[in-house]
Image (tube, rainbow, N blue to C red):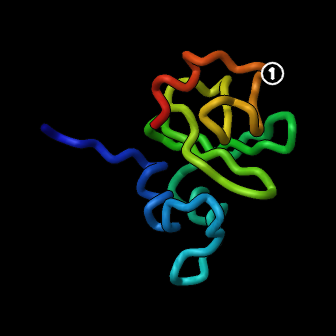
Amino acid sequence: MTTTTTDAQKIATRFGNDGLNWHDSDGVHIDDALGAAGGVLEHRRHGCWRHQMPDGSAIVVTGEAWNLGITGRPECICLSDDGATCCEPDNCSCECHADKS
């Protein structure tokens, strides 16, 4: 079985996969790393920012945390599996979370 690692997963690994670490071991801020990796920053409602990566993966950032976005669903950005935190559009449906990368 071949496992594919997305651009967003590579960035998340670099930053410890914890959603709260804003700087890597070299002191680079996650926003700068995402931009350098080709991420396109998109502002959304509720203080959410989505970094859309060239391969379709994404990282969603708020003032408090960051997390992997939902690949292939740029209209839906949520920081929690139930969509309760930082969700776009309002009331994201459960299927929006089924393919979380």
Q: Is residue 1 left or right of residue 53?
A: left
How many numbered tags mark residues here? 1
Out of 16 and 25, give the one closest to the viewer. Answer: 16
At which x and y percent is residue 52? 59, 40
Query: SS for tag 1?
Result: loop
Q: Residue furthest left?
A: 1
Q: Is residue 3 left or right of residue 99?
A: left
At which x and y percent is residue 13? 44, 62
Q: Is residue 101 left or right of residue 52?
A: left
Q: Quadrant of residue 46?
A: top right
Quadrant, the N terminus: top left
Q: Quadrant of residue 2?
A: top left
Q: Residue at x 55, y 61 (%)?
A: 18
At which x and y percent is residue 61? 70, 50
| Residue for badge 1 | 90
At which x and y percent is residue 55? 43, 38
Q: Amino acid at mark 1?
A: Asp
Q: Residue at x 67, y 35 (%)?
A: 78
Q: Is residue 21 above or below residue 94?
A: below
Q: Residue furthest bottom?
A: 26
Out of 80 and 90, give the one closest to the viewer. Answer: 80
Out of 40 and 13, give the one closest to the viewer. Answer: 13
Q: Residue furthest right?
A: 46
Quadrant, the C terminus: top left
Could you classify mark 1 by the number of other residues whose Cα lies within 10 Å: few (under 14), some (14-19), or many (20 or more)? some
Out of 48 and 20, give the one closest to the viewer. Answer: 20
